[in-house]
Amino acid sequence: NVAGSLKVVFIEKEIPKLTSDQSSQTYRIIQEIILNAIKHSGATELQIEISKEDDKMLIRTADNGVGFDVSKASSGNGLKNMPARAAMIGAEYKMESSSAGTNITLRVPMNKVKA
């Protein structure tokens, strides 16, 4: 994948308020997802959707890359850091990958934020 050849589609349905720490960790997770799509996936498109689901911010990403076997994935820092960052902010993290691409779902609780 040549730098700049990844099309990123951003869908913003509703962006709820998060704490500063939640925002920072969520930013780092999304940054890692984009970097992985560029460096490793061979994807031509990455979709990032942010919405609100009950009392959580829902972030869903999907790329159309080559995918990989999650159970046999390299234990690189990026793949280890994403679930660790999610755990730090009490978020649910799920990654699925197949030959059709990689999908990541992140649910960040909003109950700690004061309006």
Image (tube, rainbow, N blue to C red):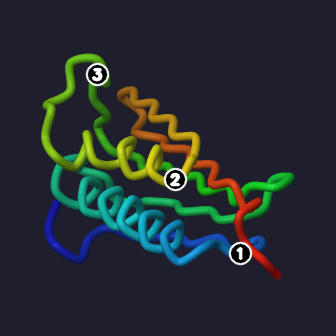
- x and y, in percent, of residue 30 in the image: 41, 63
Residue at 56% across, 44% down = 105
| Sequence-first disc among 2 and 1 | 1
- x and y, in percent, of residue 38 in the image: 23, 61
Q: Quadrant of residue 72?
A: top left
Q: Is residue 20 above or below residue 61?
A: below
Q: Which mark is residue 69?
A: 3
Asked if disc 1 and disc 3 are in contact, CB closer than 8 Å, the reply is: no
Residue situated in front as seen by the camera: 50 or 56 = 56
- x and y, in percent, of residue 19 in the image: 60, 73
| Sequence-first disc among 3 and 2 | 2
Q: Residues within 10 Å of mark 3 (few under 14, many from 20)?
A: few
Farthest residue to the top: give it: 71
Q: Is residue 77 above or below residue 16?
A: above
Q: Quadrant of the C terminus?
A: bottom right
Residue pointed to by mark 2: 61
Q: Residues within 10 Å of mark 2 (few under 14, many from 20)?
A: many
- x and y, in percent, of residue 61 in the image: 51, 53
SS class, disc 3? loop
Farthest residue to the bottom: give it: 115
Mark 2 vs mark 1: in front: 1
Q: Amino acid at mark 3?
A: Asp
Q: Amino acid at mark 2?
A: Thr
Residue at 77% across, 73% down = 14
SS class, disc 1? loop
Q: Quadrant of the N terminus?
A: bottom left
Residue pointed to by mark 1: 15
Gap between marks 1 and 3, in whole Å? 32 Å
| Sequence-first disc among 1 and 3 | 1
Asked if disc 3 and disc 2 are in contact, CB closer than 8 Å, the reply is: no
Residue at 52% across, 54% down = 89
Residue at 36% across, 28% down = 99
